[in-house]
Image: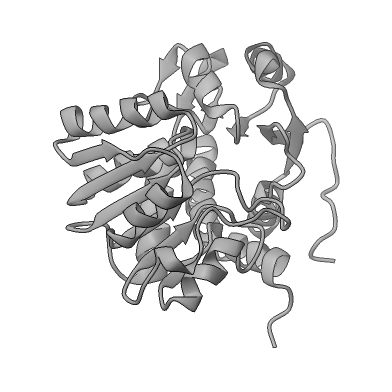
Amino acid sequence: MENALPQLSGKTRPFAVLGHPISHSLSPVMHNAAFRSLGMDAIYLPFDVHPDRLMTVLPAMREMGFAGVNLTVPLKEVAFRGIADLDESARTLGAVNTVEFPGGGMRGHNTDGAGFLAAFREAFNTTPSGKSVFILGSGGAGRAVAIACADAGARKILVTDVDSPRAASLAKEISAKHGTESSAVRAGPETWRDAAAACDVVIQATPCGMKQSDAPLMDRNAFGKGQLLFDLVYMYPRTGIMIEAEAAGAACANGLGMLLHQGARAFTIWTGRPAAVEAMRAALEQAVYGDKP
């Protein structure tokens, strides 16, 4: 009966995750597991919301009594531009992934950076400090990860994106505001391969890999022994780029740990309570890895 739905009533507190698309999200799995573990009368639901409608939908959710909302691709930067009250984390990272409604207002937070660093340490028993880092993708999540790496003491950060001006702007900001050597890499298989091969850490922060049919952006020639690959895609045990990197001897992790730790921080923002991290972790691992032997 562990996976049974709660007994819903007029007292049940609703929470949600919004994205476009949204069917891939495992946030409901972990947050509903946390509610069950803590005996909370609450439910967490996914909704597909087009970016053009986000700033109409969020105030409506506030009026409907939603207690908290997460945002995923491609809504994080839309919310950053549309929400006036931004926590320091959102202002620093330039994106919003967590929304709370204090006192009838609306405040944007970003838990991605802290969630990434917690997951990185957990996966590799190290930090980005002193390392060279290549980041594929400079959208909401990629930007958060890049700035988190800079704040954690990365020696050098290379960023790339199919939107070249966005990557160039992020690299310039990291150099100017965070004092970390940073530059943009022109998009393309050969330049990506060369940049990855020259760095200690590679972070895959694009949507590529969310479909199992997606071809990886780089093959094993971009990787080598001693490298670390962190793929923010979390719905599969091993993504295509992880398979390629592992074949070259790199250590790899998917994004499940980042999902867990950013979600735990969002939970505490909304509820003021410590998150049921181990219950959340178990639910996510069951969803992605199935029953362990």
Q: Position of residue 132 (x, y in %)?
A: 24, 55
Q: Nearer the viewer, residue 187 or 36?
A: 187
Q: Quadrant of residue 45?
A: top right
Q: Nearer the viewer, residue 171 or 188?
A: 188
Q: Position of residue 291 (x, y in %)?
A: 73, 78
Which residue is rendered at x = 46% and y = 44% of the image? 188
125 horizontally vs 139: left or right: left
Residue lying farthest to the left in this orientation: 179
Q: How is the image coloured?
A: one colour
Whether residue 116 is situated above or below residue 226 in the rendered picture: above
Whether residue 222 is situated above or below residue 207 in the rendered picture: below
Residue lying farthest to the bottom in this orientation: 293
Q: Position of residue 56 (x, y in %)?
A: 68, 11
Q: Nearer the viewer, residue 115 or 157?
A: 157
Say which quadrant the C terminus sits in: bottom right
Total number of numbered labels? 0
Say which quadrant the N terminus sits in: bottom right
Residue lying farthest to the front in this orientation: 190
77 horizontally vs 249: left or right: right
59 horizontally vs 269: left or right: right
Q: Is residue 113 visible?
A: yes
Q: Is residue 111 visible?
A: no
255 horizontally vs 180: left or right: right
Q: Quadrant of residue 199?
A: bottom left
Which residue is rendered at x = 34% and y = 77% of the image? 225
